[in-house]
Image: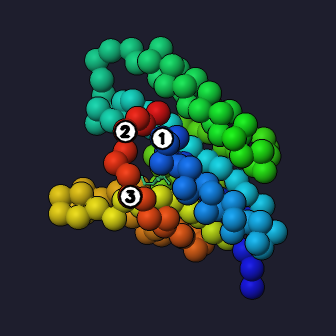
Amino acid sequence: MSYQHILVAVDLTEECDPVIKRASVLAAGTGATLSLVHIVEPMAMAFGGDVPMDLSQLQQQQFDQAKARMLALRAKYPEIEEQYCHLTYGQPRQEIHKLAKEQACDMIIVGSHGRHGLGLLLGSTSNDVLHGAPCDVLAVKLDRVKTDKA
Ligand code: AMP
């Protein structure tokens, strides 16, 4: 049975290129639809809840930056149609699982750094997405060190 709808989770760093390329080859081989998703994490979440200042402007800037990067990705990978590009606020695992269910995706693709030691204890998004996923998850091994997260 081949995959019908592949959801690629991207962190919008340059590291998402090998992840999208792998997904694109898989989708071309099976005729699957390709969807892209990026989750913008609320800043208050990063600070652990209540923050005694207004972060709305910063949050908007973060969202606009992510939107511009998504547009750049679409220009680079025209096989991904606009209606299949998703940008949303929230917690990555939760939102990726939710979208995969809503869109009836049968595979989620993430990048994986294969962390060791402390990194393993702290976990990673790819690890997080794997647990409780509503469908198969493919982790594309990444070698390079992350630089610039949206
Ligand atoms: P990380 O463990 O956070 O370094 O990220 C590993 C992989 O998780 C990335 O290559 C993406 O596939 C996915 N990922 C990380 N952050 C996000 C995000 N904010 N939105 C969507 N996918 C993400």
Q: Residue at x 74, y 80 (%)?
A: 2
Of helix, strand and loop, which one carries label 3? loop
Of helix, strand and loop, which one carries label 1? loop
Mark 2 lies on residue: 147
Q: Residue 120 has which mark?
A: none
- Quadrant location of the N terminus in the rendered image: bottom right
The x and y percentages for residue 121 are 21, 61
Q: Nearer the viewer, mark 3 or mark 1?
A: 3
- Dot 2 and dot 1 residues touching (CB under 8 Å): yes
Question: CA–CA distance between discs 3 and 1?
Answer: 13 Å
Q: Residue at x 53, y 49 (%)?
A: 16
The tag earlier along the polypeptide, 2 or 1, is: 1
Of helix, strand and loop, which one carries label 2? loop
Q: Is residue 102 visible?
A: no
Depicted 36 relative to depicted 22: above or below: above
Mark 3 lies on residue: 143
Amino acid type, callout 2? Thr
The tag earlier along the polypeptide, 3 or 1, is: 1
Amino acid type, callout 3? Asp
Q: Is residue 141 left or right of residue 119?
A: right
Amino acid type, callout 1? Thr
Question: CA–CA distance between discs 2 and 3?
Answer: 12 Å
Mark 1 lies on residue: 13
